[in-house]
Amino acid sequence: METTMADTKLRNDKFITLKQAALEINATRRFLERRVEIGELKVFKPSRRLVRVSRDELSRWITAYSSGGLLNPTKAPAPAPTGKEVAG
């Protein structure tokens, strides 16, 4: 596969668009927007329309969620009560 100048530039940028990030991880931009909305992925947003994610943050997020676990398990929701709890 031939590498173009545009491909090289994309890999070297410190900040990339959500669309570029989505292409890199084979997902949709909307998927990443949802990750931002729920606080999993942090973005740089200097204006209403301009949204960028740093490559470091994208790598951190991929590492944190690649095994299917939560980045911070202490923030996981508590299991719903089943009514079978024993009072102590």
Image (cartoon, rainbow, N blue to C red):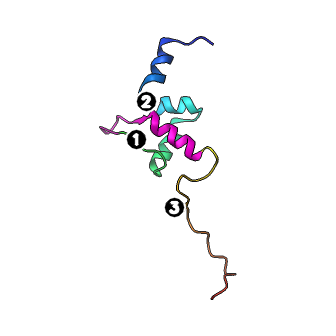
**Image location (x, y in percent) of residue 25:** 57, 33
Mark in front: 3 vs 2: 3
Mark 3 vs mark 1: which is more N-terminal? 1
Q: Amino acid at mark 1?
A: Val
Q: Is residue 82 left or right of residue 6?
A: right
Figure quadrant of the C terminus: bottom right
Of the two numbered discs 3 and 1 in the rendering, the one whose residue sits closer to the viewer: 3
Q: Which residue is mark 1?
A: 43
Q: Is residue 51 magenta?
A: yes
Choose the circle earlier in sequence order: 3 or 2: 2
The magenta-colored residue range is 45-65
Look at mark 3 in the image and give the residue it sits on: 75
Q: Residue at x 49, y 28 (%)?
A: 20
Residue 16, label in figure: 2
Q: In the rendering, at what x and y percent does residue 55 appear?
A: 46, 33
Compare marks 2 and 1 and give the one earlier in the sequence: 2
Query: How far from the left and from the top, in percent, is residue 78?
Result: 57, 68
- Distance CA(mark 2)–CA(mark 1): 10 Å
Q: Nearer the viewer, residue 83 or 72?
A: 72
Gap in Å between the C-alphas at discs 3 and 2? Answer: 28 Å
